[in-house]
Image (spheres, rainbow, N blue to C red):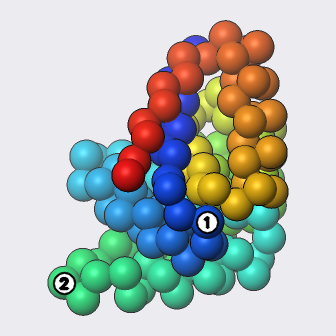
Amino acid sequence: MARIDFYILPDTTLEARLAFACKLAETIWRKGYRLHLHCEDKALAEQADKALWSFREDAYLPHALEDSDMASSVPVTLGWQKLPIPIEETALLNLHPEIPDGVERYARIAEIINQHQDVLVAKRACWQRYKELGHEVVPHKLG
């Protein structure tokens, strides 16, 4: 069973959620994992892509959208369709409101909760579902 880390932010905005996702993505990548950021739709994936380019002036995180020609050659991908099958130890950062099919193939899974009502409701349901499936769920309250 996978370990699921839930990062609980005090903020309510999508921008704060994406900013934390960028920092977390950099941390995961620096630990040697490949990473897939799973988004609700292409628009959110494009927003996350833009955020990854600008979240820190001194940072570069090699990444690409899943429909890009570069997707197979970078360690970080952003997608919104079906989860890709990991080719090596890969972490999943789930920005989608639901748990996508195929999460069990990932070495680590991260979820980000902020204090927006829609996100809270969706991620509570995810938390309960992960527990029902027998995953280890670990909360990290940030403040």
Q: Earlier in the sequence, mark 1 or mark 2?
A: 1
Tell me: residue 2, above or below residue 80: above
Q: Nearer the viewer, residue 123 or 3?
A: 123
Question: Position of 31 compared to 13: left or right?
Answer: left
Q: Nearer the viewer, residue 33 or 68?
A: 33
Q: Secondary structure at mark 1?
A: loop
Check contact, mark 1 vs mark 2: CB within 8 A.
no
Image spot of residue 118 (x, y percent): 80, 57
- How crowded pointer 2 is (Cα within 10 Å; few <14, some 14-19, many 20+) is rated as few
Question: In the figure, residue 12 lies in which quadrant?
Answer: bottom right
Distance between the Cα atoms at labels 1 and 2?
27 Å
Question: Position of 94 compared to 10: left or right?
Answer: right
Image spot of residue 4 (x, y percent): 54, 30
Question: Position of 59 compared to 46: left or right?
Answer: left
Amino acid type, residue under disc 1 in the picture: Thr
Image spot of residue 121 (x, y percent): 80, 45
Question: In the figure, residue 62 lies in which quadrant?
Answer: bottom left
Q: Which residue is mark 1?
A: 12
Tell me: residue 62, above or below residue 77: below
Amino acid type, residue under disc 2 in the picture: Asp
Residue at image point 61% right, 17% down:
135
Report whether residue 65 is seen: no
Tell me: residue 90, above or below residue 74: above
Image spot of residue 23 (x, y percent): 35, 64
Residue at image point 61% right, 72% down:
13
- How crowded pointer 1 is (Cα within 10 Å; few <14, some 14-19, many 20+) is rated as some
Residue at image point 42% right, 37% down:
140
Question: Position of 138 compared to 27: left or right?
Answer: right
Tell me: residue 28, above or below residue 19: above
Q: Which residue is mark 2?
A: 58
